[in-house]
Image (cartoon, grey):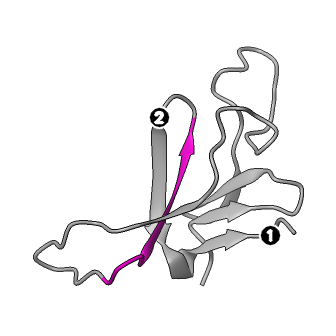
Amino acid sequence: MNPKILISESGFLSLGRKGGIKQMHCVNAGNRPRMCGDHCPLFGEPEEYDIVKRATISVEHGEFVGIEICENRLLTCRKSEFVDSRG
């Protein structure tokens, strides 16, 4: 299974999209191409989250991982779909 959220050994963020893994670019860089990654002060550290139980999903404590990026945007996925390759 492909991960939904991947942080490379170099700290760059990639997301699982239809067709594979796509490396993310900074939305605040304007016309200067810049990769999204942990070099940015707006890039948070991964944290475990509890998500409210929904009718079709039974959630265990800490089953989800979230990472905050860019002005309070929160990316979340199941722990099994998250890969942090930094040492």
Magenta residues span 60-69
Residue corresponding to mark 1: 85
- Give the spatial CA distance, label 2 vs label 1: 23 Å
Element under disc 1: loop
Tell me which numbered mark, 2 or 1, is placed earlier along the sequence.
Answer: 2
> Which sits in the foreground, 31 or 54?
54
Q: Seen in the image, is 35 located left or right of residue 16?
A: right
On the image, the x and y values in percent for residue 57 come to 22, 80
State the residue at coordinates (60%, 59%).
46
What predominant SS class does the magenta segment belong to? strand
> Which sits in the foreground, 21 or 44?
44
* Tally of marks: 2
On the image, the x and y values in percent for residue 59 come to 28, 80
State the mark number for residue 72: 2
For this orientation, the residue located farthest to the left is 55
Element under disc 2: loop
Q: Seen in the image, is 11 located left or right of residue 77?
A: right
